Amino acid sequence: MCARPVQGAWLFRTRHLILDWASGWGTHLLNKRKLLKKVLAGSKNIRFAEVVSLVEAFGFHLSRVSGSHHIFVHPDVPELLNLQEVSGQAKPYQIQQWLRLVERYNLRMED
């Protein structure tokens, strides 16, 4: 039965997404400004849902998902932003790429 491991992985991921959605997808104990300070301090321990929350606070929105690649777009930025989730965490180099986009295009956090 080759389908069982795949089905189990799908079910685990689905439960994970439902739990994130039910908790407000990115609504965590840290507010966005504190989270931004944590990111700017260079922390590599950032949850994927927290990064998504921050990215959306800066005006990006999810355009599509291709495998593990979550592609975000911004109306004022001609470049795409790719974020990947690995064991619930965001990849640090992709967070740095996002920060460079924020700086390059002088983006501000929306309230």
Image: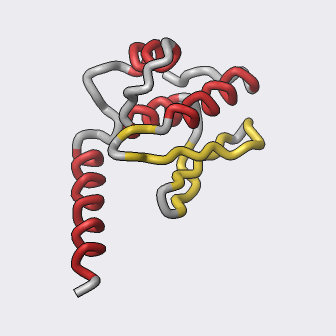
x and y percent of residue 59 in the render?
58, 34
Q: Residue at x 39, y 14 (%)?
A: 34
- What's the colour scheme? secondary structure
Q: Residue at x 73, y 38 (%)?
A: 77
Image: 106 above or below 67:
above
User: In the rendered image, which quarter is residue 76 located in?
Assistant: top right
Image: 41 above or below 5:
above
* Front one among 52 and 46: 46
* Front one among 14 and 59: 14
* Left or right of 8, for residue 73: right
* Front one among 77 and 41: 41
x and y percent of residue 13 in the render?
29, 59
* Quarter of the N terminus within the rendering: bottom left
x and y percent of residue 49 in the render?
37, 39
Q: Residue at x 38, y 27 (%)?
A: 45
* Left or right of 82, for residue 32: left
Image: 69 above or below 61:
below
Q: Residue at x 69, y 30 (%)?
A: 101
Image: 13 above or below 88:
below
x and y percent of residue 60 in the render?
58, 39
